[in-house]
Amino acid sequence: MAWTILVAGGLFEVVWAVGLKQAAGRAAPLALTFAAMALSIGCLAVALRTLPVGTAYAVWTGIGAAGTAVYGMAVLGEPRDLVRLSCIGLIVAASVGLKLFSPHP
């Protein structure tokens, strides 16, 4: 269950990162961005009750970083070159590796 909550927190991190770009000083998108921030950190805090802090934090930020980069490429027209895709792949591989090789609660 802790891993599911952690993944949800990572996805909320993507939402708030994208929300910051979309808000541009507008109240409603900014409020949603702050809500996503709170949910993201809240999910991380709950997951940390069970998971090792180093592993959980690295996976949480990895989901946020890779997810935001993929969103930027898919929706915002950011470059999709091989080097960027390879780096995102490394982030995903590292996150999966940390999950697979960390102690299971």
Image (cartoon, rainbow, N blue to C red):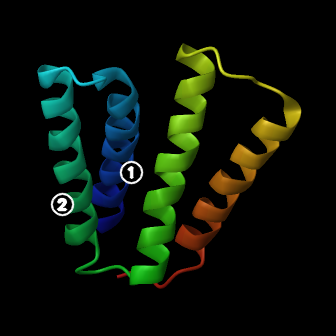
Q: Which amino acid does label 1 sit on?
A: Gly
Depth check, front residue: 27 or 45: 27
Residue in view at x 12 percent, y 21 percent:
28
Residue 72 picture location, percent across and down: 56, 26
Residue in view at x 59 percent, y 18 percent:
74
Residue in view at x 74 percent, y 23 percent:
79
- Indicate which disc residue 42 carries: 2
Secondary structure beneath dot 2 equals: helix
Image-quadrant location for residue 46: bottom left
Q: Quadrant of the C terminus?
A: bottom left
17 sits left or right of 92 in the view: left
Residue 38 picture location, percent across and down: 17, 52
Q: In which quarter of the image is the N terminus?
A: bottom left
Q: Which residue is the site of mark 1?
A: 10
Residue 63 picture location, percent across and down: 49, 50
Direction right: furthest residue: 82
Secondary structure beneath dot 1 equals: helix
37 sits left or right of 103 in the view: left
In this view, 98 is above or below 32:
below
